Image (tube, rainbow, N blue to C red):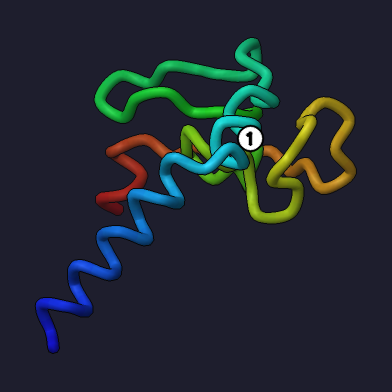
């Protein structure tokens, strides 16, 4: 029964990955909005915003589809250095 459940879940995941909606969502992504961060990979959206999801798939929690430019929820992120974290 457990094996059958695992196989069914795998089949559903494969179907979801191959669905046209996934491909459409990726094609709507504005590639000029992507940034490469060493050790993390590609991120989308304004990485200086507090709400940025730090993801290659979703911009942020409050405006996931974007655009970031002119977003009314924008708040600058407070960056800390390693020295400030130790204090």
Q: Residue 19 appears at what percent x and percent y? A: 52, 43
Q: Residue furthest top?
A: 32
Q: Residue 72 appears at what percent x and percent y? A: 89, 43
What residue did someone put label 1 on? 25
Instruction: Give the residue at x 12% y 84%.
Output: 2
Using the image as rendered, state which of residue 18 and residue 26 is in the foreground.
18
Instruction: Determine which quarter of the picture holds residue 18.
Output: top left
Instruction: Give the residue at x 64% y 11%.
Output: 32
Q: Residue 47 appears at what percent x and percent y? A: 57, 30
Residue 44 at least partly seen: yes
- Label 1: which secondary element: helix
In-image side of 32 versus 73 (left or right) = left
Instruction: Give the residue at x 30% y 53%.
Output: 87
26 vs 73: above or below: above
In what quadrant of the picture does the N terminus appear?
Answer: bottom left
Instruction: Determine which quarter of the picture holds residue 34.
Output: top right
Q: Residue 50 appears at what percent x and percent y? A: 62, 45
Using the image as rendered, state which of residue 64 and residue 21 is in the foreground.
21
Q: Residue furthest bottom?
A: 1
In-image side of 35 versus 74 (left or right) = left
Residue 47 at least partly seen: no
2 vs 43: above or below: below
Using the image as rendered, state which of residue 28 and residue 5 is in the foreground.
5
Instruction: Give the residue at x 30% y 59%.
Output: 11
- Is disc 1 surrounded by few (<14), some (14 to 19) or many (20+) residues within 10 Å? few
50 vs 7: above or below: above
Instruction: Determine which quarter of the picture holds residue 53.
Output: top right
* Total numbered labels: 1
In-image side of 14 versus 63 (left or right) = left
In-image side of 4 versus 86 (left or right) = left
């Amino acid at each position: 029964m457990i094996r059958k459940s695992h196989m069914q879940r795998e089949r559903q995941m494969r179907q979801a990955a191959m669905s046209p909606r996934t491909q459409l969502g990726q094609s709507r992504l504005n590639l000029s909005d992507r940034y490469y961060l060493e050790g993390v990979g590609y991120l989308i959206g304004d990485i200086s915003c507090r709400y940025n999801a730090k993801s290659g798939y979703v911009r942020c929690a409050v405006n996931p589809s974007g655009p970031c430019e002119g977003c009314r929820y924008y708040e600058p992120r407070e960056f800390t250095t390693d020295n400030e974290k130790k204090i």
